[in-house]
Amino acid sequence: MDTDSLRLFVLAADKLNISAAGRQLGLAPAVASARLAKLEHALGADLLHRSTRKVSLSQEGAAFLPYAREMIAQEEEGLAALGKGEASPKGTLRFTAPSTFAQAYIAPILPKFLARYPGITLDMRLSDKVFDLIEGSFDLAIRNSALEDTSLKGRKLADDYRILCASPAYLERRGIPQTPEDLITHDLIAFTGQEVKQLRRHDGTMARFDPQLAHSRLTIDDGTSHKIATTSGAGIAFCALWSVHEELKSGALVRVLPDYDVADGTVLWLIYPKSTTVSAKVRVFMDFLIEEIGNDPIWQRGLGSVI
C-alpha cells in the first residue's frame, strides 16, 4: 500500500482539511483530492466525508486511522534500522495527559522540545478525563494509575506518591485525625468515582479506608480545583505529591496521618498502544520527558521535613 497516500490521509484526518494536508506534503489541492480518492477506491471504503463546508472522518475512516498510523510508523522504523529515512524525527504526535500535571510540568518545557525537534508537531489533549488511546488515535499518554490495561504498554516516568493533606485552618476547626477510622467523621474532598484506599503504616500494618463512608459534600473532577479547595479549608483530600509539594513546603497544606502512605500502586506512566511500533517521534518525546521530569522529580526534593 502506498504510504505517501496513507500520510496524506492521516494529515487530512488530523486537520480535517484535504487542501491543508496536501500543502504540507507539497501537493496541489486537486492532486491531494485525487490521491485520496484513489486510496479510497483501493480500499473499497469512503474514509472521509466531504462537503463544500467541511471534511469529516467516516466511520470506516476512524476505524482505519490507527492502522494507517501504524503502517507509516513501521516504514519509518524499518528505514531507520537500515540507516535510511529521516535524519531527524518528524510528524504529528498526538498526546494526552492530566491537565493539572501538564500545566505544572509539561507546558513549561515544550519550547525546549520543539526547538530540539523542529520536524515534530504536537497535538495535545490536556484533561483530567481519561481518553481511550486507540479510539482517539493517540500516540502517547501520561496516566497516573496502576497499568492494568493489557492492550497498553508503558515506560515509567516517575513515582506517584499519594498522601492525605488538609489546610491548617481546617485542622484547627475540625481537629486532627489520629487513625484512618477517624477520617469517617471528617469532610473529605473527593474525586469522581473514588475507590477504596489501602493505607500502609510505616511499621508495615495495613488499614482500609472507604471514601464512600466519609462525610463528603464536595466531589471535584479537576485536579487544580481539587487542590484549591483543599488549600482553602474545605476538607481533607488524597493528593499527589507532585501536585501539592509547594503547598507543603510553604505550610499552606499539612500532611494528615503522616505515619501512613497510600498504597494504591499508582505510578506516572508514559503509555502507548501495545500493537503500535514505537516511532522515532514517540521515542524521543518519551526520552525527553524522562530526562526533564522523571530523572530527578522536582516534587521529591527537600521534602524530608514536611512529609
Image (cartoon, rainbow, N blue to C red):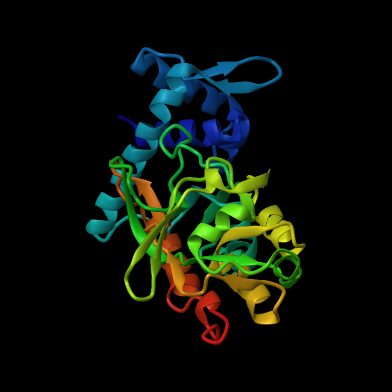
**Residue 227 occupies quadrant:** bottom right
Quadrant in which the N terminus appears = top left
- Residue 178 vs residue 301, the one in the foreground: 178
Tell me: 53 left or right of 148: right
305 lies above or below 293: below
Residue 70 percent coordinates (x, y): 34, 39
Q: Residue 229: tell me if it is visible.
A: yes
- Residue 203 vs residue 164, the one in the foreground: 203
Residue 197 percent coordinates (x, y): 44, 53
Q: Residue furthest left?
A: 82
What's the residue at 50%, 71% (across, down)? Answer: 293
Residue 280 percent coordinates (x, y): 37, 56
What's the residue at 67%, 67% (across, down)? Answer: 175
55 lies above or below 109: above
- Residue 138 vs residue 67, the one in the foreground: 138
Report the number of numbered marks: 0
Residue 266 percent coordinates (x, y): 41, 58
178 lies above or below 296: above
What's the residue at 34%, 17% (across, down)? Answer: 42
- Residue 159 vs residue 185, the one in the foreground: 185
Q: Residue 87: tell me if it is visible.
A: no
Tell me: 85 left or right of 295: left
